Structures are given as structure tokens and as C-alpha cells.
Image: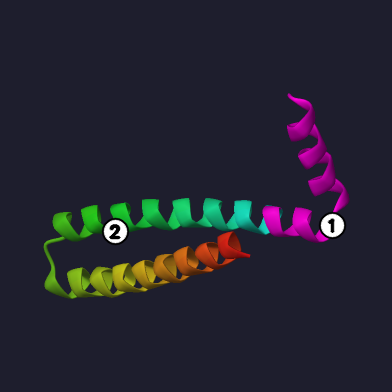
Amino acid sequence: MKRKKLLNTLTDLLNKERHKQRKHRDELEALLNKLEKKEIELEKKILKEKHERKQRRLRTELEIVKAQHEKGVKALQGLDES
């Protein structure tokens, strides 16, 4: 690593608030990836399901997961701005 990058890394580690914020951001990104995979999985299940009642239940669950994903993206954008 170059000197500037090493100094930035050291500053991040020494600055507890910045380190905490970066850790929170990383955890949020991981969670968003899991939610995205869950969305894809639910969409596939909906297409395979024959019973209308089960399809409705899966669609409701999919809507909830999509809403959570959108909220997470907004929160991540808020962290990027600060």
C-alpha cells in the first residue's frame, strides 16, 4: 500500500466513530445482499407454486422483503452522504 492509503487506514482504525460507521456500513451491505437473494428466491417460488393462496402469501412476503431492501438502500445512501 502507498503511504497515503496506509495513513487513511490507520486513521480509520484509530478513530472509533469512523471505524464503527464503516463496520455498520459493511454489515448493512451484507444484509442488503442477503435480502436481494431472498427476493430472487421468493420470485422463483411464486412462479413454481400452483396454489393461489400460497402464491398470495409468497407475494406478501416478497413485498415485505422489497420494502426492507429499499429502506436499507436509503439508509446506506444516508451513511455515504455523512
Residue position marked by numbered label 1 in the rendering: 16
- Taking the spot 79% from the left edge, 28% from the top edge, the residue there is 3
Q: What residue type is disc 1 on?
A: Lys
Q: Choose between 6 and 54: the one closer to the eye.
A: 6
Q: Which mark is residue 42?
A: 2
- Taking the spot 35% from the left edge, 67% from the top edge, the residue there is 66
Q: What residue type is disc 2 on?
A: Leu
Q: Choose between 13 and 28: the one closer to the eye.
A: 13
User: Which quadrant is the C terminus positioned in?
Assistant: bottom right
Q: Earlier in the sequence, mark 2 or mark 1?
A: 1
Q: Give the left or right position of residue 43, taking residue 26 as reference.
A: left
Q: Secondary structure at mark 1?
A: helix
- Which x, y percent locates residue 21? 71, 59
Displayed quadrant of residue 61: bottom left
Classified by dominant secondary structure, the portion drawn in magenta counts as helix
Q: Give the left or right position of residue 72, taking residue 80 as reference.
A: left
Q: Give the left or right position of residue 33, taking residue 3 as reference.
A: left
- Crowdedness of circle 2 by 10 Å Cα count: few (<14), some, many (20+)? some
Q: Give the left or right position of residue 45, taking residue 80 as reference.
A: left
- Taking the spot 46% from the left edge, 63% from the top edge, the residue there is 73
